Amino acid sequence: MRKKLMAANWKMYKTPDQTRDFFRNFLPLVSGQTRDEIVVCPPFLDLPAAIESAKGSNVAIGAQNVHWKEEGAFTGETSAAQLLAIGVTHVVVGHSERRQYFGETDDTVNLRLKTALEAGLTPICCVGEVLEEREAGMTDDVLRRQCVRAFHAISAKKAAKLVVAYEPVWAIGTGKTATPEIAAEAHAVIRYEAGKIFGEEFAAQLRILYGGSVKPENASALMAQEEIDGALVGGASLDPKSLAAIVKY
Ligand code: PEP
């Protein structure tokens, strides 16, 4: 049995004060929820406020990116050691918005993933096709390529904490959700590919989350799919009641 992971990606929203407010309202709503793991990934600036607010609770805190170098002249970047030093446990890697707007490639995703795993962070590695790729019938090929390159030269032992998020780009922030069946099909492709790379035993326990316009109204149908091991939630994670309803699907 794979324990589901319900992760929130706040993107570039909220100040530290708004972060504290969110947790004040959110934590009581999910205090008894131990069925699944819960992770909130705020912007870097809000991480200390989030960590302080969530201390002693059932909610872990993740970052939205990590650089692959230990330290150095990399203006605007953040290292794994810096994240660990303040209590971050998870990190989103290769989000489609990083790929689309900030030059993230399959190769840099691989570097970030290796570093996160080496450091003991739990990476949530995002993969997913754009609309033109889906319409051209290329979804499976795109997912295979993204997995092969992201997981390149990583051993199954090192990858133990790996989590993958299938996020069809056409469903992110658009209100269009993949049907549970479409998502489950894509997850099966990812799991099969992970099996070829890391071995079947590893693949059987790999958690694959779905992301793309997850809302309180569609969470339970998505989570009912055996292939779906949790959610990565953007827009609907900004409101404490909405995220709590998703967590409790
Ligand atoms: C995301 O940011 O990873 C995401 C899935 O966003 P949304 O839920 O808003 O589509």
Image (cartoon, rainbow, N blue to C red):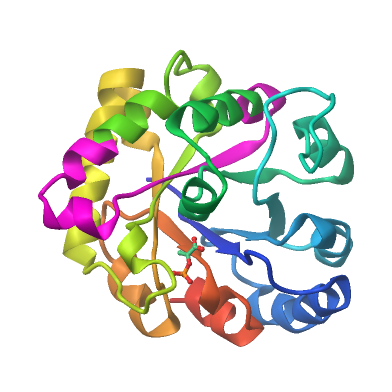
Residue farthest to the left, as pictured: 137
Position in image of residue 34 (x %, y %) = 59, 62
* Residue closest to the eye, 112 or 75: 75
Magenta extent:
116-143
Q: Residue at x 51, y 82 (%)?
A: 245
Quadrant for the N terminus in the image: top left
Vertical comparison of 240 with 81: above or below: below
Q: Residue at x 80, y 73 (%)?
A: 19
Vertical comparison of 223 with 76: above or below: below
Position in image of residue 155 (x %, y %) = 47, 14
Q: Is residue 40 magenta?
A: no
Quadrant for the C terminus in the image: bottom left
Q: Is residue 35 left or right of residue 249?
A: right
Position in image of residue 128 (x %, y %) = 33, 49
Position in image of residue 37 (x %, y %) = 57, 56
Vertical comparison of 156 with 172: above or below: above
Counting every numbered tag in the picture gives: 0
Q: Residue at x 36, y 79 (%)?
A: 175
- In the picture, residue 240 is in which quadrant? bottom right
Task: Mark yes or no: residue 203 visible.
Answer: no
Q: Is residue 222 left or right of residue 67?
A: left
Task: Mark yes or no: residue 237 visible.
Answer: yes
Q: Is residue 139 magenta?
A: yes
